[in-house]
Image: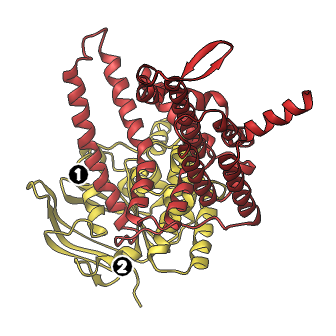
């Protein structure tokens, strides 16, 4: 029953976002902006940079631990989309064979370094984006987007997507179960029945849309939905923002790893 | 002053595909009355309810609500008076959280933020769901969804409550809570249902519809104990009446 597990996976990430920890309580706008800046800073590193990316793991690890998110949930999803990143960089080691450094007598080419740089950047950005979803409820993110002046029509689309994603998935789940209950082995699972399933689903969706629209009209809908504002910017939000953004810039402009290495070197001498 | 009278005069309705759903329905519902509407599947109950709110407009005949004739121009106003609870809660609850869903109506009425908040709190309190206000609807049980759906309508302070199968998919306890809740409302209530026991408990008057026509209209007690009438309409004696029936010979 793969569809069942997929359904509950999506629900799982959503249920995480309704916990109540320090990170969950931060204003979604702040989290959104900080995460956005984080991603920009990580992506801005040149292609042969590897060691100075490492300190950036502090931010996702912070979200993970303070937000009480189980690492498996995130790791599995990152792994799931990792082929995309791997295929972007996979030919680098073949094309770029200039030796950059030699570690313990093994020459390491620029291709390998840039390949791993892509992978690290991928892990950093994707896991942080997933963590943002896991520690911020979806309506919270929509509220943030609305208040950051994203056109309202997009925000409303997202809200409806979120609301009816689960309804539609459940509907599909029921249909898939009904099909499985009456098909044995391979028979009944051909592409032909799949096409019919999809078309019935489309028709049902259209009918549902009609009924939802009626429900909206009967409560005075006239083409506008106001997204409610539940969050207010607090002291700790601003402190969090200033603190994390300045740390990102520190990591970006000073090679912290190099600096620590030098200190260690000096103390051992 | 309007008295929230609902009056239908010889209402006909056919769908664009020519299916005739209503064939000359007339009745008058007075202020504060509770009326149950029963009938076989496909008798026209839902079509009738959709006409009361202006989602569908009668092809012939006249509907007036609170002495205002229902037409395209007036239906926005009439929707403020008529609170409609739909059969399927997933259609009714379309906002991401319970609070926002209940607030949707009051916000559209143009109330101030404080006033909206008060309305939402009162409505949720009334159905006993205040603790659910920050939850998304897909994390509620069917009974909770139904209660919230009623709250979304109550938050608009309607004069007339129209409900389509309010007790479907509810467990017995949630159903009993719903009945008690409905009995507590002083609104004019129009309830379409196959749950005749519910109608018996909540409504003093009952209308039976068959193939788009009114075939019986009177006291619930009388109509719902008329076995032949009920059987002609694919209905049965309410369970509580069946019990009396069996008991009597002994």
Using the image, name the chain to which the residue with label 2 belongs.
Answer: B
Q: Can residue B17 be seen in this view?
A: yes
Position of residue A219 relative to residue A206, above or below, is: below
Query: Where residue B225 sits: x, y (%)?
Result: 38, 50
Query: Where residue A175 sits: x, y (%)?
Result: 33, 29
Chain letter corresponding to the colour yellow: B
Is there one chain holding both mark 1 and mark 2? yes
Query: Where residue A136 sits: x, y (%)?
Result: 61, 50
Which element carries disc 1, helix, strand or loop?
Answer: loop
Residue at 40% x, 23% y is A95
Q: How crowded is mark 2: few (under 14 residues within 10 Å), some or many (20 or more)?
A: many
Between residue A206 and residue A225, name the one nearer to us.
A225
Q: Could you tell whether A228 is left or right of B238 in the image?
A: right
Q: Could you tell whether A33 is left or right of B6 in the image?
A: right
Position of residue B90 relative to residue B127, above or below, is: above
Position of residue A101 relative to residue A221, above or below, is: above
Q: Give the image quarter of residue B31.
A: bottom left
Q: Could you tell whether B30 is left or right of A13 in the image?
A: left
Which element carries disc 2, helix, strand or loop?
Answer: loop
Using the image, name the chain to which the residue with label 1 belongs.
Answer: B
Residue at 44% x, 40% y is B242
Q: Identify the residue under disc 2.
A: B5
Query: Where residue B200 sits: x, y (%)?
Result: 45, 54
The residue lying furthest to the top in this view is: A185
Q: Identify the residue under disc 1.
A: B43
Chain letter corresponding to the colour red: A
Q: Give the image quarter of residue B51.
A: bottom left
Mark-to-mark CA distance, 1 and 2: 24 Å
Residue at 31% x, 22% y is A179
Between residue B33 and residue A224, name the one nearer to us.
A224
């Amino acid at each position: 029953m793969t569809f069942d597990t997929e359904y509950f996976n999506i629900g799982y990430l959503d249920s995480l976002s309704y916990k109540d920890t320090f990170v969950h309580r931060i204003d979604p706008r702040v989290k959104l902006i900080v995460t956005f800046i984080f991603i920009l800073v990580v992506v801005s590193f040149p292609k042969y940079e590897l060691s100075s990316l490492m300190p950036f793991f502090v931010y996702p690890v912070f979200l993970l631990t303070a937000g009480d998110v189980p690492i498996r949930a995130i790791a599995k999803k990152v792994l799931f989309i990792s082929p995309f990143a791997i295929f972007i960089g996979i030919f680098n080691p073949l094309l770029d064979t200039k030796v950059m450094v030699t570690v313990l007598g093994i020459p390491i080419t620029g291709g390998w370094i840039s390949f791993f740089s892509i992978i690290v950047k991928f892990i950093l950005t994707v896991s942080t984006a997933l963590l943002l979803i896991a520690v911020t409820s979806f309506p919270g993110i929509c509220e943030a987007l609305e208040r950051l002046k994203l056109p309202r029509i997009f925000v409303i689309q997202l809200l409806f997507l979120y609301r009816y994603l689960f309804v539609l998935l459940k509907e599909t789940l029921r249909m898939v179960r009904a099909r499985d209950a009456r098909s044995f082995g391979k028979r009944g699972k051909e592409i032909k029945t799949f096409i019919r399933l999809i078309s019935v689903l489309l028709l049902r969706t259209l009918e549902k849309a009609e009924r939802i629209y009626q429900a909206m009209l009967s409560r005075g809908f006239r083409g506008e939905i106001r997204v409610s504002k539940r969050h207010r910017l607090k002291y700790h939000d601003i402190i969090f923002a200033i603190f994390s953004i300045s740390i990102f810039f520190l990591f970006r402009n000073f090679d912290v790893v190099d600096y620590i290495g030098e200190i260690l070197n000096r103390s051992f001498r | 002053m309007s008295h929230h009278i609902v009056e239908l005069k010889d209402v006909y309705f056919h769908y664009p595909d020519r299916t005739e759903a209503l064939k000359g329905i007339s009745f008058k519902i007075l202020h504060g009355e509770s009326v149950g509407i029963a009938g076989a599947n496909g008798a026209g109950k839902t079509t009738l309810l959709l006409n009361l709110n202006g989602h569908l407009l009668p092809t012939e005949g006249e509907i007036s609500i609170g002495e205002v004739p229902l037409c395209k121009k007036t239906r926005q106003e009439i929707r403020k008076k008529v609170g409609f609870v739909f059969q399927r809660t997933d259609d009714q609850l379309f906002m991401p959280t319970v609070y926002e869903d209940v607030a949707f109506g009051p916000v559209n009425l143009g109330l101030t933020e404080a006033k909206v908040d008060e309305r939402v709190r009162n409505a949720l309190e009334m159905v006993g769901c205040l603790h659910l206000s920050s939850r998304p609807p897909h994390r509620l049980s069917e009974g909770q969804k139904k209660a919230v759906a009623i709250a979304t309508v109550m938050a608009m302070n309607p004069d007339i409550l129209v409900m389509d199968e309010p007790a479907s998919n509810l467990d017995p306890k949630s159903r009993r809570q719903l009945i008690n809740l409905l009995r507590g409302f002083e609104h004019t209530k129009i309830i379409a249902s196959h749950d005749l026991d519910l109608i018996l408990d909540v409504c003093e008057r009952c209308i039976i519809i068959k193939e788009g026509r009114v075939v019986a209209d009177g006291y619930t007690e009388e109509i719902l104990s008329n076995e032949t009438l009920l059987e002609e309409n694919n209905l049965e004696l309410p369970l509580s009446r069946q019990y009396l029936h069996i008991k009597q010979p002994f």
